[in-house]
Amino acid sequence: MNRIAVVPGSFDPVTLGHLDVIERAAGLFDEVHVLVVHNPDKSALLPIAQRVSLIERSIEDAGIVGNIVVASWSVGLLVDYCTDVGAHVLVKGIRSQVDVAYETPMAIVNRHLAAVETVFILPNPANAHVSSSLVRQVSALGGDVSPYVPTAVYEYLQET
């Protein structure tokens, strides 16, 4: 049986915390889809195609191995993508109780809609405080985000 999981997120931009979750998911599942999804509640810094490219470069640079597909999805429900690719698991990184409170109702609905289970992965403590919104804010104010993001993202942000 091919165990396929989807790691969804806005990844705007991808952080070292995201890479940690992706790498750990790759060790648990036969195939991992890293899925850039549009979040209408957030104003994006990077276009979706750029996020996909930065994730691909970051995974390669980090030497993360496994059957990893990086894609984007902006039409329909997340579970529709899961059904399309044969995934029965969503993997979500959880940094705090706030994340648990936010993710739990969605996990229940996803299970109800399409029998897709959600697996929560706790962060490496070194990355537990890092979020894409924090990176965007620090970067916009001229701060050093190199401890929080892959080299490809850091270089991209320096160029823009």
Image (cartoon, rainbow, N blue to C red):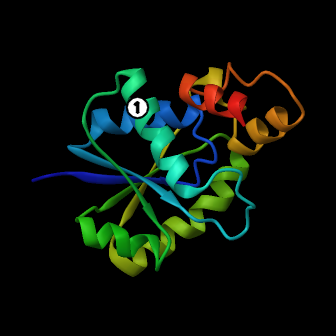
Q: Residue at x 40, y 72 (%)?
A: 79
- Residue 19: % across, % down: 49, 33
The picture quadrant where one finds residue 86 is: bottom left
The picture quadrant where one finds residue 81 is: bottom left
Q: Residue 97 versus residue 13: which sits nearer the camera?
A: 13
Res. 146 visible in picture: yes
- Residue 15: % across, % down: 60, 34
Q: Which residue is mark 1?
A: 59
Q: Residue at x 68, y 19 (%)?
A: 147
Residue 25 vertical position relative to residue 147 in the rendered view, above or below: below
Q: Residue 108 versus residue 58: which sits nearer the camera?
A: 58
- For this view, does 159 lie left or right of residue 116? right
Residue 18 vertical position relative to residue 10 in the rendered view, above or below: above
- Residue 154: % across, % down: 64, 26
Q: Residue at x 75, y 61 (%)?
A: 43
Res. 123 visible in picture: no
> Alpha-carbon neighbours of circle 1 within 10 Å: few (<14), some, or many (≥20)?
some
Q: Secondary structure at mark 1?
A: helix
Q: Residue 50 versus residue 14: which sits nearer the camera?
A: 50
The picture quadrant where one finds residue 44 is: bottom right
Residue farthest to the left, as pictured? 1
Type of the residue with mark 1: Ile
- Residue 56: % across, % down: 41, 38
Residue farthest to the right, as pictured? 141
Residue 6 vertical position relative to residue 83 in the rendered view, above or below: above
